[in-house]
Amino acid sequence: MSPEVPPSTRRALLRAGAGGLLGAAVAGCGFMPAKTPDAKDLAPPRARVDGDLVYFNWADYVDPSVFKGFEKEYGVKVVQSNFDSMEGMVAKLNAGNRYDVIFPSAKWAQRLARGGRLRRIDHSQITRAKDVFGAYPYFADPWYDPGSAHTVPFTAYKTGIGWRRDRLGDLSGSWRDLWNDAARGKVFLLDDRDEVLGMGALELGLDVSTGDSGDLDRITRLLAGLRPRLRGFSSDSYNNLLNGNALMTQAWSGDMAAMLNQAKDPSVFGFEAPKEGTPINSDCYAIPWNAPHPGTAMLFIDYMLRPENVKKNIEYIGYPMPVAGSEKVYAALVEPFPECLVTEADLKADLFFRNGSRTAEDARDTAWTHVKAG
């Protein structure tokens, strides 16, 4: 029996649209380290105990027993801090806060690496590197970090629709299901700029990250017709379904999988990956350039990749981890929701959210403001 999963706060309150930070171009402008990193700051650290682990991540995103095991084995403490958005994470880094390991999503990992904010990672210092990069070719050379020079993948997930099967029956497998008259007034969208605009783009056959003003006008017009049908915007997907606030919600696959540990009868619920396309994302392990204990961070990454710890964490958070041998663990967890599975084909579908120019990001910010305002 999988351990009980706490309320899904790890991705709650995720928001895109933080003005200047979000408008930073992909070249990395907008990042302002306290000092300019030199070659030593960016060099790959050796895996060794060099102090306690200062950890910065979404809340409830690692099984507490894994932390305890790491502390006991290496004689260190894990000092935890949490963020509630990528913008919040970067703001803390820009303010000079120092962390040993952080967990950016793909597009933010690209920004941080290009901005000279991440240390390189020597794969030979990771005992089980082959279980990731050998088994998952996509992550050996991802678009956001060529050669995975600065990151190791932590999770992969997709965005789809969760719904109350007991109230709505079967759906059609399309993003248009969000307009279902039977769910009117009981529909939530994620409180997330990229996810909502991306959903509208996919429904219209547009690029998921489009920053074209004409495309965004079409998307906002489409979503204007959905807005009166919504209960609201919320990233607490599975609690809304469990407590009946929602009959249908845009949802991350991992949160829907985590819900299975809370639902008395999983057959009451469903999850679909719409046929028009479903956004894919990945969170990464990364070590900031100014990490006080980068050696301990390397040991932690290596520890997290051990099979027993991968299994514990998958069952705890509901998100798959791209590590060889873990596939059956996740498949068993999501047996009621098979569309939660993230395949190699999903990764190659190129539906990741990408960084745009400042003009494009500003246009997306404006479109999101219009959508939220109704």
Image (cartoon, rainbow, N blue to C red):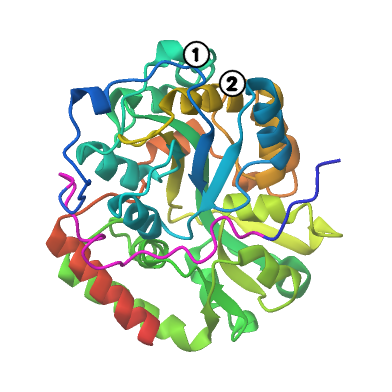
Find disc 2 in the rendering and name its residue.
324
Q: Amino acid at mark 1?
A: Lys
Q: Quadrant of the N terminus?
A: top right
Magenta stretch, main secondary structure class: loop
Q: Position of residue 12 (x, y in %)?
A: 54, 63
Residue 209 visible in rendering: yes
Looking at the rendered structure, the secondary structure element under dot 1 is helix
Q: Is residue 5 above or below residue 178?
A: above
Residue at (53% x, 57% y) in the render: 11
Q: Position of residue 191 (x, y in %)?
A: 47, 70
Q: Is residue 154 above or below residue 363?
A: above
Q: Nearer the viewer, residue 7 or 100?
A: 100
Q: Within 10 angstroms of label 1, few (less than 14), some, or many (20 or more) residues?
A: some
Question: Are discs 1 and 2 less than 8 Å apart at CB?
Answer: yes
Q: Which residues are magenta?
A: 8-28
Residue at (51% x, 62% y) in the render: 174
Q: Position of residue 364 (x, y in %)?
A: 25, 68
Q: Is residue 110 magenta?
A: no
Q: Nearer the viewer, residue 155 or 81?
A: 81
Of the image marks 1 and 2, the number of the one nearer the N terminus:
1
Q: Position of residue 104 (x, y in %)?
A: 40, 45
Q: Amino acid at mark 2?
A: Ala
Find disc 1 in the rendering and name its residue.
130
